[in-house]
Image: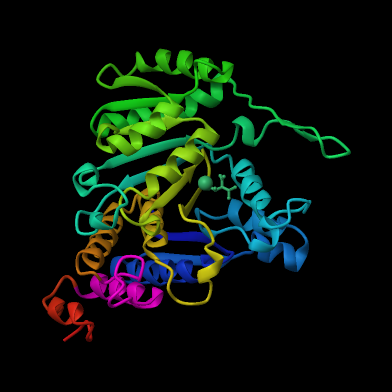
Amino acid sequence: MSNSYKIAVLPGDGIGPEVTAESVKVLNVIAQAFQYKFEFEYAKMGAEAIFETGNPLPEETLTVCKNADAVLFGAIGDPYFDNNPDAKVRPEQGLLKLRKELGLFANIRPIKTYSSITKKSPLKKEIVDGTDIQIYRELISGIYFGEKFTDENGEFAYDICKYNKDEIVQIAHLAFQDAQKRRKKLTLIDKANVLDTSRLWRKVVQDIAKDYPDVTLEFLFVDNAAMQMILNPKQFDVILTENMFGDIISDEASVIGGSIGLLPSASIGNDNALFEPIHGSYPQAKGKGIANPIASILSAAMLLDYLKLDVAANKLREAVEHAIDHRYVTEDLNKEQNYSTSEVGDFIVDYIKFSENSYYNFENVKLGKSTIV
Ligand code: IPM
Ligand code: MN
Protein backbone atom coordinates (compact mmCIF):
# COMPACT_ATOMS: atom_id res chain seq x y z
CA MET A 1 0.00 0.00 0.00
CA SER A 2 1.27 3.41 -0.88
CA ASN A 3 1.97 5.72 2.00
CA SER A 4 1.87 8.86 -0.07
CA TYR A 5 -1.25 11.04 -0.23
CA LYS A 6 -2.32 14.12 -2.16
CA ILE A 7 -4.21 16.61 -0.04
CA ALA A 8 -5.95 19.60 -1.59
CA VAL A 9 -5.86 22.58 0.76
CA LEU A 10 -8.48 25.33 0.41
CA PRO A 11 -7.79 27.88 3.17
CA GLY A 12 -10.77 30.05 2.11
CA ASP A 13 -11.90 33.23 3.87
CA GLY A 14 -11.62 34.98 7.25
CA ILE A 15 -9.77 32.88 9.81
CA GLY A 16 -9.73 29.91 7.38
CA PRO A 17 -6.09 30.44 6.31
CA GLU A 18 -4.81 30.80 9.91
CA VAL A 19 -6.45 27.68 11.28
CA THR A 20 -5.69 25.62 8.18
CA ALA A 21 -2.00 26.56 8.44
CA GLU A 22 -1.95 24.91 11.88
CA SER A 23 -3.51 21.73 10.50
CA VAL A 24 -0.94 21.56 7.74
CA LYS A 25 1.79 22.08 10.33
CA VAL A 26 0.38 19.22 12.39
CA LEU A 27 -0.05 16.93 9.37
CA ASN A 28 3.58 17.57 8.46
CA VAL A 29 4.77 16.39 11.85
CA ILE A 30 2.45 13.37 11.61
CA ALA A 31 4.03 12.57 8.25
CA GLN A 32 7.49 12.70 9.82
CA ALA A 33 6.53 10.67 12.86
CA PHE A 34 4.70 7.94 10.93
CA GLN A 35 6.71 7.98 7.68
CA TYR A 36 3.91 9.09 5.41
CA LYS A 37 4.18 11.53 2.58
CA PHE A 38 1.55 14.25 2.30
CA GLU A 39 1.67 16.36 -0.82
CA PHE A 40 -0.30 19.57 -0.26
CA GLU A 41 -1.77 21.38 -3.21
CA TYR A 42 -3.29 24.79 -2.47
CA ALA A 43 -6.28 26.25 -4.30
CA LYS A 44 -8.67 29.16 -3.90
CA MET A 45 -12.34 29.15 -3.00
CA GLY A 46 -14.85 31.66 -1.62
CA ALA A 47 -14.65 35.44 -1.37
CA GLU A 48 -10.94 35.42 -2.06
CA ALA A 49 -11.55 33.53 -5.31
CA ILE A 50 -14.35 35.92 -6.31
CA PHE A 51 -12.17 38.99 -5.74
CA GLU A 52 -9.39 37.44 -7.83
CA THR A 53 -11.26 35.58 -10.55
CA GLY A 54 -14.95 36.48 -10.31
CA ASN A 55 -15.75 32.83 -9.57
CA PRO A 56 -16.17 31.40 -6.04
CA LEU A 57 -15.06 27.96 -7.28
CA PRO A 58 -12.59 28.34 -10.14
CA GLU A 59 -12.35 25.32 -12.50
CA GLU A 60 -8.73 24.85 -11.46
CA THR A 61 -9.75 24.45 -7.80
CA LEU A 62 -12.30 21.82 -8.71
CA THR A 63 -9.68 19.89 -10.67
CA VAL A 64 -7.20 20.04 -7.77
CA CYS A 65 -9.90 18.68 -5.42
CA LYS A 66 -10.98 15.91 -7.79
CA ASN A 67 -7.40 14.73 -8.19
CA ALA A 68 -6.67 14.71 -4.46
CA ASP A 69 -7.10 11.85 -1.99
CA ALA A 70 -8.82 14.27 0.40
CA VAL A 71 -9.60 17.97 0.72
CA LEU A 72 -8.82 20.11 3.75
CA PHE A 73 -10.94 23.24 3.82
CA GLY A 74 -10.86 26.28 6.13
CA ALA A 75 -13.91 28.56 6.10
CA ILE A 76 -16.05 30.56 3.74
CA GLY A 77 -17.91 33.86 3.88
CA ASP A 78 -17.17 37.58 3.97
CA PRO A 79 -19.12 40.55 5.39
CA TYR A 80 -18.88 42.28 2.02
CA PHE A 81 -21.37 39.73 0.66
CA ASP A 82 -23.39 39.14 3.85
CA ASN A 83 -24.31 42.81 3.88
CA ASN A 84 -25.26 42.80 0.22
CA PRO A 85 -28.25 40.49 -0.43
CA ASP A 86 -28.35 41.58 -4.10
CA ALA A 87 -24.89 40.23 -4.87
CA LYS A 88 -25.35 37.70 -7.66
CA VAL A 89 -22.13 35.83 -7.00
CA ARG A 90 -21.58 34.74 -3.39
CA PRO A 91 -18.73 32.88 -1.65
CA GLU A 92 -21.06 30.18 -0.28
CA GLN A 93 -22.00 29.17 -3.82
CA GLY A 94 -18.43 27.90 -4.19
CA LEU A 95 -18.75 25.50 -1.28
CA LEU A 96 -22.21 24.31 -2.34
CA LYS A 97 -21.00 23.65 -5.87
CA LEU A 98 -17.91 21.85 -4.59
CA ARG A 99 -20.04 19.59 -2.36
CA LYS A 100 -22.28 18.77 -5.30
CA GLU A 101 -19.47 18.23 -7.81
CA LEU A 102 -17.58 15.95 -5.44
CA GLY A 103 -20.78 14.07 -4.52
CA LEU A 104 -20.29 14.69 -0.79
CA PHE A 105 -23.67 13.39 0.31
CA ALA A 106 -22.98 12.86 4.00
CA ASN A 107 -21.80 15.54 6.37
CA ILE A 108 -20.68 14.04 9.67
CA ARG A 109 -20.44 16.35 12.67
CA PRO A 110 -19.26 14.81 15.94
CA ILE A 111 -20.41 16.80 18.97
CA LYS A 112 -18.02 15.79 21.70
CA THR A 113 -17.56 17.44 25.07
CA TYR A 114 -14.41 17.74 27.18
CA SER A 115 -15.22 17.83 30.88
CA SER A 116 -12.30 20.19 31.62
CA ILE A 117 -14.05 22.97 29.68
CA THR A 118 -17.78 22.26 29.94
CA LYS A 119 -18.00 24.99 32.59
CA LYS A 120 -17.76 27.33 29.58
CA SER A 121 -20.99 25.90 28.23
CA PRO A 122 -24.09 28.14 28.25
CA LEU A 123 -25.88 25.11 29.74
CA LYS A 124 -25.38 23.61 33.20
CA LYS A 125 -22.29 21.42 33.44
CA GLU A 126 -24.28 18.41 34.68
CA ILE A 127 -26.57 18.59 31.64
CA VAL A 128 -23.65 18.80 29.26
CA ASP A 129 -20.93 16.50 30.65
CA GLY A 130 -20.74 13.24 28.74
CA THR A 131 -22.59 14.49 25.65
CA ASP A 132 -21.35 12.60 22.61
CA ILE A 133 -23.43 12.93 19.46
CA GLN A 134 -22.71 12.05 15.87
CA ILE A 135 -24.78 14.10 13.43
CA TYR A 136 -25.33 12.80 9.89
CA ARG A 137 -26.58 15.65 7.75
CA GLU A 138 -27.57 15.01 4.11
CA LEU A 139 -25.50 17.52 2.16
CA ILE A 140 -26.29 17.69 -1.55
CA SER A 141 -30.04 17.74 -1.89
CA GLY A 142 -33.18 19.13 -0.24
CA ILE A 143 -34.06 22.81 -0.16
CA TYR A 144 -30.45 23.86 -0.68
CA PHE A 145 -30.40 22.37 -4.17
CA GLY A 146 -34.04 22.51 -5.32
CA GLU A 147 -35.28 25.00 -7.87
CA LYS A 148 -35.08 28.63 -6.75
CA PHE A 149 -36.92 31.63 -8.06
CA THR A 150 -37.23 35.36 -7.42
CA ASP A 151 -39.56 37.42 -9.61
CA GLU A 152 -38.46 40.54 -11.46
CA ASN A 153 -39.70 43.08 -8.94
CA GLY A 154 -38.24 41.09 -6.09
CA GLU A 155 -41.57 40.62 -4.31
CA PHE A 156 -42.05 36.89 -4.72
CA ALA A 157 -39.61 34.02 -4.27
CA TYR A 158 -39.51 30.30 -3.59
CA ASP A 159 -37.08 27.44 -2.87
CA ILE A 160 -38.23 23.89 -3.50
CA CYS A 161 -37.33 21.03 -1.18
CA LYS A 162 -36.98 17.68 -3.00
CA TYR A 163 -35.67 14.26 -2.06
CA ASN A 164 -35.64 10.89 -3.76
CA LYS A 165 -35.34 7.50 -2.11
CA ASP A 166 -31.75 6.81 -3.22
CA GLU A 167 -30.48 10.03 -1.66
CA ILE A 168 -31.91 8.96 1.68
CA VAL A 169 -30.75 5.35 1.42
CA GLN A 170 -27.08 6.11 0.94
CA ILE A 171 -26.67 8.35 3.97
CA ALA A 172 -29.01 6.27 6.15
CA HIS A 173 -26.78 3.20 5.78
CA LEU A 174 -23.73 5.18 6.92
CA ALA A 175 -25.62 6.49 9.95
CA PHE A 176 -26.93 3.05 10.96
CA GLN A 177 -23.47 1.50 10.58
CA ASP A 178 -22.00 4.17 12.81
CA ALA A 179 -24.76 3.67 15.39
CA GLN A 180 -23.88 -0.03 15.48
CA LYS A 181 -20.34 0.89 16.54
CA ARG A 182 -21.59 3.35 19.14
CA ARG A 183 -24.51 3.28 21.58
CA LYS A 184 -26.89 1.73 19.03
CA LYS A 185 -29.47 4.47 18.90
CA LEU A 186 -30.44 6.47 15.84
CA THR A 187 -32.76 9.48 15.91
CA LEU A 188 -34.27 10.65 12.65
CA ILE A 189 -35.08 14.37 12.86
CA ASP A 190 -37.78 15.59 10.49
CA LYS A 191 -41.06 17.47 10.23
CA ALA A 192 -43.22 14.52 9.15
CA ASN A 193 -46.37 16.09 10.59
CA VAL A 194 -46.16 18.75 7.86
CA LEU A 195 -43.76 17.88 5.04
CA ASP A 196 -44.04 15.21 2.34
CA THR A 197 -40.26 15.00 2.07
CA SER A 198 -40.10 14.18 5.80
CA ARG A 199 -42.71 11.44 5.39
CA LEU A 200 -40.54 9.95 2.62
CA TRP A 201 -37.52 10.05 4.95
CA ARG A 202 -39.47 8.21 7.67
CA LYS A 203 -40.68 5.52 5.30
CA VAL A 204 -37.28 4.87 3.74
CA VAL A 205 -35.42 4.95 7.06
CA GLN A 206 -37.96 2.61 8.71
CA ASP A 207 -37.36 0.14 5.91
CA ILE A 208 -33.57 0.32 6.21
CA ALA A 209 -33.83 -0.13 9.98
CA LYS A 210 -34.83 -3.76 9.34
CA ASP A 211 -31.22 -4.42 8.25
CA TYR A 212 -29.98 -3.12 11.62
CA PRO A 213 -32.09 -4.86 14.25
CA ASP A 214 -29.59 -4.06 16.99
CA VAL A 215 -30.09 -0.30 16.49
CA THR A 216 -33.05 1.43 18.15
CA LEU A 217 -34.67 3.89 15.77
CA GLU A 218 -36.49 6.93 17.13
CA PHE A 219 -38.16 9.87 15.41
CA LEU A 220 -38.33 13.48 16.53
CA PHE A 221 -39.92 16.51 14.91
CA VAL A 222 -37.28 19.14 14.36
CA ASP A 223 -38.92 21.75 16.60
CA ASN A 224 -39.02 19.29 19.48
CA ALA A 225 -35.48 18.13 18.66
CA ALA A 226 -34.23 21.72 18.98
CA MET A 227 -35.72 21.82 22.47
CA GLN A 228 -34.48 18.35 23.48
CA MET A 229 -30.95 19.32 22.42
CA ILE A 230 -30.93 21.93 25.18
CA LEU A 231 -32.95 20.01 27.79
CA ASN A 232 -31.03 16.76 27.58
CA PRO A 233 -28.34 16.47 24.91
CA LYS A 234 -27.08 13.18 26.37
CA GLN A 235 -30.18 11.38 25.08
CA PHE A 236 -28.75 11.54 21.54
CA ASP A 237 -26.32 9.07 19.99
CA VAL A 238 -26.50 9.21 16.18
CA ILE A 239 -28.75 11.83 14.57
CA LEU A 240 -29.78 11.49 10.95
CA THR A 241 -31.44 14.38 9.16
CA GLU A 242 -31.95 16.26 5.93
CA ASN A 243 -29.83 19.14 4.71
CA MET A 244 -31.35 22.27 6.25
CA PHE A 245 -32.50 20.72 9.54
CA GLY A 246 -28.96 19.35 9.88
CA ASP A 247 -27.46 22.77 9.27
CA ILE A 248 -29.54 24.32 12.03
CA ILE A 249 -29.44 21.51 14.61
CA SER A 250 -25.68 21.12 14.25
CA ASP A 251 -25.05 24.81 14.94
CA GLU A 252 -27.24 24.53 18.01
CA ALA A 253 -25.41 21.41 19.17
CA SER A 254 -22.00 22.89 18.45
CA VAL A 255 -22.05 25.33 21.37
CA ILE A 256 -23.06 22.75 23.98
CA GLY A 257 -19.48 21.78 24.80
CA GLY A 258 -18.33 25.33 25.49
CA SER A 259 -16.78 26.46 22.22
CA ILE A 260 -17.73 26.06 18.58
CA GLY A 261 -14.00 26.34 17.94
CA LEU A 262 -13.47 22.70 18.86
CA LEU A 263 -15.72 20.92 16.42
CA PRO A 264 -14.61 19.29 13.19
CA SER A 265 -16.61 17.81 10.33
CA ALA A 266 -16.21 15.37 7.47
CA SER A 267 -18.13 15.46 4.22
CA ILE A 268 -18.02 12.11 2.53
CA GLY A 269 -18.92 10.91 -0.96
CA ASN A 270 -18.27 7.70 -2.85
CA ASP A 271 -15.03 8.96 -4.41
CA ASN A 272 -14.14 12.12 -2.51
CA ALA A 273 -14.03 13.56 0.97
CA LEU A 274 -13.63 17.03 2.44
CA PHE A 275 -12.76 18.01 6.00
CA GLU A 276 -13.54 21.34 7.58
CA PRO A 277 -14.21 22.93 10.96
CA ILE A 278 -17.89 23.54 11.77
CA HIS A 279 -17.23 27.18 12.60
CA GLY A 280 -17.49 29.91 10.01
CA SER A 281 -15.01 32.49 8.74
CA TYR A 282 -15.22 34.72 11.89
CA PRO A 283 -14.10 37.81 9.97
CA GLN A 284 -13.76 39.95 13.12
CA ALA A 285 -10.86 37.74 14.23
CA LYS A 286 -9.10 37.54 10.88
CA GLY A 287 -5.33 38.07 11.09
CA LYS A 288 -5.34 38.54 14.88
CA GLY A 289 -3.96 35.12 15.76
CA ILE A 290 -6.78 34.49 18.24
CA ALA A 291 -8.81 31.89 16.33
CA ASN A 292 -9.01 28.45 17.88
CA PRO A 293 -7.25 26.02 15.50
CA ILE A 294 -8.54 22.87 17.23
CA ALA A 295 -11.67 22.41 15.08
CA SER A 296 -9.48 22.46 11.99
CA ILE A 297 -6.85 20.19 13.56
CA LEU A 298 -9.55 17.69 14.57
CA SER A 299 -10.85 17.87 11.00
CA ALA A 300 -7.35 16.80 9.96
CA ALA A 301 -7.73 13.86 12.38
CA MET A 302 -10.97 12.89 10.60
CA LEU A 303 -9.04 13.12 7.34
CA LEU A 304 -6.50 10.65 8.74
CA ASP A 305 -9.38 8.34 9.74
CA TYR A 306 -10.70 8.51 6.20
CA LEU A 307 -7.27 7.55 4.81
CA LYS A 308 -7.32 4.66 7.31
CA LEU A 309 -4.28 6.04 9.15
CA ASP A 310 -5.90 5.20 12.48
CA VAL A 311 -2.84 5.19 14.69
CA ALA A 312 -1.85 8.65 13.49
CA ALA A 313 -5.43 9.92 13.88
CA ASN A 314 -5.53 8.70 17.47
CA LYS A 315 -2.17 10.22 18.28
CA LEU A 316 -3.39 13.53 16.93
CA ARG A 317 -6.57 13.37 19.05
CA GLU A 318 -4.50 12.49 22.11
CA ALA A 319 -2.35 15.58 21.47
CA VAL A 320 -5.45 17.77 21.18
CA GLU A 321 -6.88 16.38 24.40
CA HIS A 322 -3.63 17.18 26.17
CA ALA A 323 -3.75 20.73 24.87
CA ILE A 324 -7.30 21.10 26.15
CA ASP A 325 -6.65 19.43 29.51
CA HIS A 326 -3.56 21.58 30.13
CA ARG A 327 -5.46 24.70 29.09
CA TYR A 328 -3.05 25.28 26.26
CA VAL A 329 -5.87 26.84 24.27
CA THR A 330 -6.89 30.13 22.69
CA GLU A 331 -8.75 32.95 24.41
CA ASP A 332 -12.24 31.55 23.77
CA LEU A 333 -11.32 28.87 26.33
CA ASN A 334 -8.56 30.48 28.37
CA LYS A 335 -8.86 34.23 28.87
CA GLU A 336 -5.94 34.41 31.33
CA GLN A 337 -3.18 32.99 29.17
CA ASN A 338 -4.83 33.40 25.78
CA TYR A 339 -2.37 31.43 23.71
CA SER A 340 -2.27 32.36 20.05
CA THR A 341 -3.51 30.21 17.17
CA SER A 342 0.02 29.18 16.25
CA GLU A 343 1.14 28.58 19.85
CA VAL A 344 -1.67 26.04 20.22
CA GLY A 345 -0.58 24.44 16.94
CA ASP A 346 3.04 24.34 18.19
CA PHE A 347 1.99 22.67 21.43
CA ILE A 348 0.17 19.95 19.53
CA VAL A 349 3.15 19.50 17.20
CA ASP A 350 5.53 19.22 20.18
CA TYR A 351 3.31 16.69 21.86
CA ILE A 352 3.29 14.49 18.77
CA LYS A 353 7.05 14.77 18.50
CA PHE A 354 7.93 14.18 22.11
CA SER A 355 5.13 12.30 23.83
CA GLU A 356 6.88 8.97 23.34
CA ASN A 357 9.64 9.98 25.74
CA SER A 358 9.82 11.85 28.98
CA TYR A 359 11.27 15.14 27.79
CA TYR A 360 7.95 16.79 28.12
CA ASN A 361 7.29 18.97 31.14
CA PHE A 362 3.65 19.77 31.59
CA GLU A 363 4.30 21.91 34.66
CA ASN A 364 6.16 24.34 32.42
CA VAL A 365 3.36 24.19 29.92
CA LYS A 366 0.88 25.25 32.56
CA LEU A 367 3.16 28.14 33.48
CA GLY A 368 3.29 29.16 29.86
CA LYS A 369 7.04 28.47 29.70
CA SER A 370 8.94 26.43 27.14
CA THR A 371 7.24 23.16 26.47
CA ILE A 372 10.41 21.12 26.16
CA VAL A 373 12.98 20.72 28.92
C1 IPM B 1 -22.31 24.92 6.90
C2 IPM B 1 -22.50 26.32 6.42
C3 IPM B 1 -22.92 26.26 4.96
C4 IPM B 1 -24.24 25.54 4.88
C5 IPM B 1 -22.97 27.63 4.26
C6 IPM B 1 -21.67 28.38 4.39
C7 IPM B 1 -23.38 27.50 2.83
O1 IPM B 1 -23.42 27.01 7.20
O2 IPM B 1 -21.43 24.22 6.37
O3 IPM B 1 -23.02 24.51 7.81
O4 IPM B 1 -25.30 26.14 5.11
O5 IPM B 1 -24.23 24.34 4.58
MN1 MN C 1 -24.15 25.86 8.91
Q: Nearer the viewer, residue 70 or 183?
A: 183
Rendered view: 215 above or below 155: above
What x and y, as percent, mark residue 135? Answer: 39, 38
Rendered view: 353 above or below 364: above
Q: Residue furthest right?
A: 152
- Report whether 50 appears left or right of 207: right
Question: Which span is picked out in magenta?
Answer: 328-354
Is residue 350 highlighted in magenta?
yes
Is residue 274 highlighted in magenta?
no
What x and y, as percent, mark residue 364? Answer: 16, 82
What x and y, as percent, mark residue 35? Answer: 33, 67
The residue sitting at 26% across, 70% down in the picture is: 352
- Report whether 233 appears left or right of 8: left
User: Quadrant location of the C terminus?
Assistant: bottom left
Display colour scheme: rainbow
Q: Residue furthest left?
A: 358
Q: Nearer the viewer, residue 169 or 332?
A: 332
Decide if residue 172 is in sight here: no
Decide if residue 122 is in sight here: yes
Rendered view: 318 above or below 175: below
Rendered view: 219 above or below 153: above
The residue sitting at 39% across, 76% down in the picture is: 342
What x and y, as percent, mark residue 115? Answer: 20, 54
The residue sitting at 79% across, 32% down in the picture is: 156
